[in-house]
Image (spheres, rainbow, N blue to C red):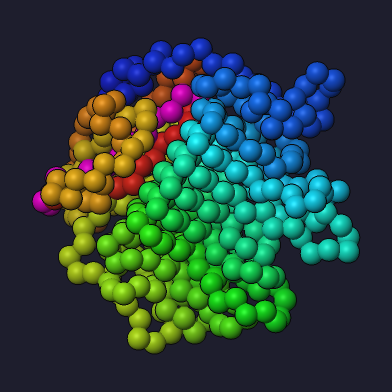
């Protein structure tokens, strides 16, 4: 394990964020408390933090805001529809905004004992959104839709448990998505009948890009058979150190040609399947956990044996495509970029680098992003980004 220059990383950016107001949301709080996430969003200014205490909360709309929405205890904040739903309830939507979401679970809701669960598709439009340690579950449709946006997911579960309609985990259109860890699960049909056939864990369409590492994608079961784990264009999908498995009777990958995979486990349950493109070199990455003040933050890289990996750090993400220089992309804002140092992997291609995070309260809710780049090949090979909101 290598301990890199903490002062260079966390000291350089400390104090860059303006003063933040923290809005506490508590569905069980006293009079005068924000009882719903929407109320806090409506009151927030750009750069503010919305801290959500355990409980069940109604769906919300984040429109034109720049905020962080963080569960006080990840996994204890459920977002869905009220038990008595208004006509045509809306899904949680992020539109024309930059929002960082930590620890929320978006769930289908039972609004009546006489009805099936109401689907809850989380939608991202024209935005920059990051999801950390979140869960997305739909009942009757796609769980997470990203359109004309940039999104980052870390250790999220995106799952469709479908009775009607398309049962896709993650659907991406004209967007750039990076993912580290987590699961993308296509539909698991609860009822017989129907004719929908799309039960992919990940579906990419139009001019979209997906770069993931250390995740699992499973094709689902639909009324007309199994689905591929991934449906994508050959040029726009990159994955390393992932597990990709097709649904019953289906291939893991559905594409017009081989996909860009490195060190992936591909499980085909069908015939005539496409595979990995030859000669693809990517840097794999996972993290030890979120960045927490007063603790050690570690990043685990996977690359070629004895390969060199340089860690780049920024307080913001981006999508910079320089195909002659870096594959698949620089996912960090180059205007805020620093070089945090490099180290060599062992004989198995494993490398862990760590930083001691100062116990400085002012760092909480700031954002730091890390990307590994290997100069062992030309163009350089890269990892997705890890890091996120400091807790």
Q: Is residue 55 left or right of residue 307?
A: right
Q: Position of residue 137 (x, y in %)?
A: 63, 56
Q: Position of residue 241 (x, y in %)?
A: 35, 59
For image coordinates 67% across by 65% down, the residue present is: 140
**Where the N terminus falls, by quadrant?**
top left
> Which residue is nearer to you in this view: 239 or 230?
230
Residue 242 position (above or below residue 102): below
> Which residue is nearer to you in this view: 341 or 139?
139
Could you tell me if residue 94 is visible in this image?
yes
Residue 99 position (above or below residue 231): above
Determine if the magenta segment contains residue 328. no
Residue 362 position (above or below residue 124): above
Q: Which residues are magenta?
A: 364-378
For image coordinates 19% across by 45% down, the residue present is: 322
Q: Position of residue 174 (x, y in %)?
A: 40, 53
Q: How many marks?
A: 0
Residue 240 position (above or below residue 41): below
For image coordinates 56% across by 40% down, the residue present is: 94
Could you tell me if residue 382 is visible in this image?
no
For image coordinates 41% across by 13% down, the residue present is: 15
């Amino acid at each position: 394990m290598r301990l890199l220059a903490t002062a260079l990383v966390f000291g350089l950016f400390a104090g860059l964020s303006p003063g933040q107001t923290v809005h506490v949301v508590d569905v069980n709080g006293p009079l005068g408390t924000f009882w719903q996430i929407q109320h806090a969003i409506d009151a927030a200014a750009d750069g503010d933090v919305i801290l959500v205490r355990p409980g069940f909360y109604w769906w919300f709309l984040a429109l034109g805001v720049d905020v962080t929405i963080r569960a006080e205890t990840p996994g204890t904040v459920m977002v869905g529809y009220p038990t008595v739903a208004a006509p045509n309830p809306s899904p949680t939507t992020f539109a024309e905004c930059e929002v960082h979401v930590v620890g929320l679970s978006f769930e289908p809701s039972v609004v009546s004992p006489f009805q099936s669960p109401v689907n809850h598709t989380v939608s991202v439009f024209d935005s920059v959104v990051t999801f950390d340690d979140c869960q997305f579950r739909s009942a009757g449709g796609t769980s997470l839709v990203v359109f004309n946006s940039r999104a980052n997911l870390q250790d999220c579960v995106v799952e469709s448990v479908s009775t009607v309609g398309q049962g896709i985990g993650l659907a991406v259109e004209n967007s750039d998505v990076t993912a580290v860890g987590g699961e993308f699960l296509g539909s698991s049909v609860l009822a017989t009948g129907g004719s929908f056939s799309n039960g992919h864990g990940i579906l990419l369409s139009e001019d979209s890009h997906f770069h993931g590492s250390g995740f699992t994608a499973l094709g689902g079961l639909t009324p007309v058979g199994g689905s591929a784990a991934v449906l994508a264009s050959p040029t726009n999908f990159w994955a390393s150190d992932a597990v990709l498995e097709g649904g019953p009777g289906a291939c893991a990958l559905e594409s017009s040609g081989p996909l860009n995979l490195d060190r992936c486990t591909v499980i085909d349950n069908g015939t005539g399947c496409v595979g990995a493109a030859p000669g693809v070199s990517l840097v794999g990455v996972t993290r030890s956990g979120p960045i927490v003040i007063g603790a050690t933050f570690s990043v685990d890289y996977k690359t070629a044996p004895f390969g060199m990996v340089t860690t780049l750090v920024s307080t913001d993400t981006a999508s910079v495509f320089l195909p002659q220089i870096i594959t698949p992309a620089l996912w960090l804002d180059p205007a805020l970029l620093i070089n945090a140092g490099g180290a060599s992997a062992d004989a198995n291609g494993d490398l862990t680098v760590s930083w001691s995070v100062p116990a400085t309260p002012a760092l909480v809710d700031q954002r730091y992003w890390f990307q590994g780049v290997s100069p062992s090949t030309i163009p350089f090979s890269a990892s997705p980004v890890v890091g996120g909101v400091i807790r």
